[in-house]
Amino acid sequence: QIIGIYASLVGLGIVVAGVGGLVFVLAIAGLIDRRGGHPVLVACILIYSFAILGHTLATNIWLFFLMTLVMNMSSQVYWPASDSTIASLTDASRVTVAMSALRVANAVGIGLGGLIGGLIVSNGGLPEYRMLFITSAALVLFAGVLVRLKVPNTPLQARNAEGNHGTWQDVRPDRLYLYACAVLMLMIIGFSQMQVTVPAFLRREAGIDEGMIGVLFLVNTLLVIVLQLPLAGWVSRHNVGRLLAIAGVMWAGAFATMLLAANNGMPVAVAVFVLFTAGELIFMPATAVIPVRLAPAHLRGRYFSLLSVGWGLSYAIASLLGGVALDLPHTEIMWPILAVCMLVGAVGALRLATPDRLAPPSSSST
C-alpha cells in the first residue's frame, strides 16, 4: 500500500516465493548433511539480512518479487539448519529441551520485533518503513555474526557406514518417518487454524474485538515462554505417540468448543485458547523428538528439511481451507470437521507409540 503495489500482486508474490522457498529447502538439505547445520545457518541468516535490506529499494513489483523470493528461501532454510546445529551440540536426551529453548527465543524475538516495528512505522510512510527494514537487517546481521563467532561448528557424521553421503533415496524407505510426517501435517493444519480462521471468526461471529483477541494471543505466548522448557524435559522422557494423541484430543475439544462461541463470546474464547495452548505445549516439543530419534546422523539435514516442508505445506493448505470456510454462509461448519480431523490425527499418532525407534533414549519403551 505504501508504494502502490496492488494487494493481489503482493499476495501472488508471497505465494510464489513461499513455494520457491519450500523447493529450495529440499535442494539445500544435502548441503546441511555434508557441511553441517552451522555454516548453512550462518549463510541463510546473512542472506536473510541482505534480503530485508533490499526491501528498502523494492519500490516496483519485480524487485519486490525478487527480495521476497530470497527472503523466503533463506527463512525456510533457517529451521532445518538451526535444528541440525542444535542437534550437533546437544546430547540426544536433551535435544528436545534445546530445540524448545530455540523456539521460545524465536517467540520472544517475534514478539519484540512486532513491538519495535509497530513503534517505528506507526502513522508513518515510506521513510519509516525503510528505517524499519534497515533496523531489522542490522539486527539480523548482528545475530548472524554472533552465531558465526560464538556458536561452535560441530558437524554431525556426514557419511554412512559404507562411507557414502546420503541422498533423498535413503529417506524414502523410512516408512515410519514418512507416516509420522503425514500425521503431523494433518495436525499442523488444525494448529494453523488458530492463526488463520479463529481470530476472524471470533471477531465476526462472537463480537470479540481485536484488542481482546490480541490479549488472548499474548497470554498464549507468555504461557509458552514460561512453561515450554519445563514441559519439554517432561515430553522428552515420555512416549511421543501418546503425547501427540493427547494434543490432538485437546485440539479436537478446542474446535468443538468453537461451536458455542457465537452465542457465548469471551468465556468460550478463553476455554478454546486454554485447550489450544495446552495442546501446543505438548505438540511442539513432541514434533522435535521425531526426526531426532528416527534420522541417521548423516541424514538429519534431510529429515529436518522434510518436516520443515511439511509445516510450510500444511500452513498453505490451512490458509486456503480457512479462506474458503470464512466465505461460506455458515462458517461454523468447519469446527466439527476440524475436530474430527484432529481426532483422526490423534488415532494416527497412537501408531507412533509402539516403535522402539521412537522410545526415549534412556528406555526401550515408555
Image: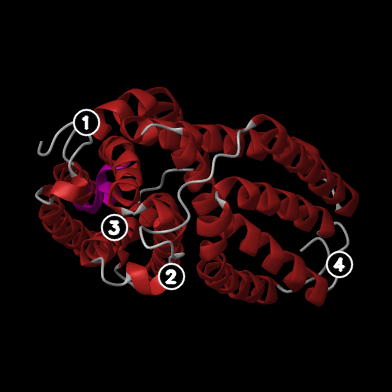
Which numbered dot is residue 59?
4
Q: Which residue is mark 1?
A: 237
Measured in 3D between alpha carbons, the distance from the residue under mark 1 to the one under mark 4, in whole angstroms, is 51 Å
Residue 222 in the figure: left or right of residue 262:
right
Q: Which residue is mark 2?
A: 167
Seen at 48% across and 34% down, the residue is 89
Which numbered dot is residue 172?
none
Q: In the rendered image of this protein, does residue 144 appear above or below residue 234?
A: below
Bounds of the magenta span? 253-265
The 10 Å Cα crowd at callout 1, few under 14, some 14 to 19, many 20 or more, is some
**Callout 1, which amino acid?**
Arg
Q: Which residue is mark 3?
A: 184
**Mark in front: 1 vs 3:** 1
Which of marks 1 and 2 precedes in the sequence? 2
Measured in 3D between alpha carbons, the distance from the residue under mark 2 to the one under mark 4, in whole angstroms, is 41 Å
Q: Which of the two residues, 69 or 148, is positioned nearer the viewer here?
A: 148
**Mark in front: 1 vs 4:** 1
Which of marks 3 and 1 precedes in the sequence? 3
Contact, CB < 8 Å: mark 1 with mark 3? no
Which of marks 4 and 2 precedes in the sequence? 4
**Mark in front: 2 vs 3:** 2
Where is residue 179 drawn, in percent x and y? 22, 65
**Mark in front: 2 vs 4:** 2
**Mark in front: 4 vs 3:** 3
